[in-house]
Amino acid sequence: MSVVEVLLIAVSVSIDALAVSIGGALCDRTGRRLRNAAWAALFFGGFQIIMPVIGFFAATMLQSVVASVDHWLAFVLLGLVGGKMIYEAIAEKEPEKNGDGSPCLNCPPDFFAPKALVVPAVATSLDALAVGAGLAFAGTGIWLPALAMGVVTAAASIAGVLLGTRIGMLAGERVMMIVGGSAIILIGVKILLEHLELLPW
């Protein structure tokens, strides 16, 4: 897997964490942005390293059973992850508004407290778990992609906390999710075509 492909996957799976960090920054009432950014980077980035490794080794244990169709499994898994991102971007409803037109947010007392971050960190890393399994079936390594996913997600989380809504306003979360989902699907297609020897290079 090329460096470009690794970075595409890393950026794509970081979008959920970026969006959650932006939402958390909107909710925050503590005013402790640096502390919030550090915890967000640790939890979101850390789980984005751990989950694909778990997915990779779980799939590796099954690889002898599914060796004849591993490229199809990689294609399906990456296709499902990318398709889910695109579907969620298109089907997402506009948030409810308060009387003054601001988003209606149901915010916890401290969104970026460590115990509060566990659930969103796990939830936003489930795509990375599936990607890790897909990479195992594709016959590629996991350590560089997992590290890249973690580092990029940590950086995205910090940016989300520090910049808040400004990031979403640059292109919009829906556009970012569609682009990211499309990139993951294309990588899955490339893996399938390589195994079927249908690529000209």
Image (cartoon, rainbow, N blue to C red):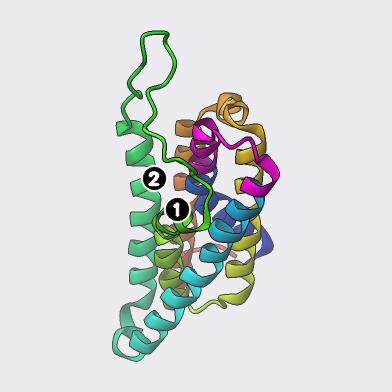
Which structural element holds mark 2? helix
Magenta span covers which residues? 19-36
Q: Which residue is mark 2?
A: 85
Image coords of residue 32 (percent x, y): 65, 40
Image coords of residue 95 (percent x, y): 35, 24
The question of residue 151 being in magenta is answered with no
Q: Is residue 53 left or right of residue 101?
A: right
Looking at the image, residue 100 lies above or below residue 110: above
Q: Which residue is mark 1?
A: 116
The question of residue 20 being in magenta is answered with yes
Instruction: Give the farthest residue toward the bottom.
Output: 64
Q: Classify residue 49 by image quadrant.
A: bottom right
Report if residue 7 is visible in the image: yes
Q: What residue do we see at 35% from left, 91% from top?
A: 64
Q: What residue do we see at 44% from left, 46% from top?
A: 181
Instruction: Point out the image quarter for the N terminus.
Output: bottom right
Q: Is residue 17 left or right of residue 154?
A: left
Dot 2, how many residues are within 10 Å of its Cα: few (below 14), some (14-19), or many (20+)? many
Check disc 2 and give the amino acid type.
Met
Looking at the image, residue 188 lies above or below residue 84: below
Q: Is residue 68 left or right of residue 151?
A: left
Q: How many marks?
A: 2
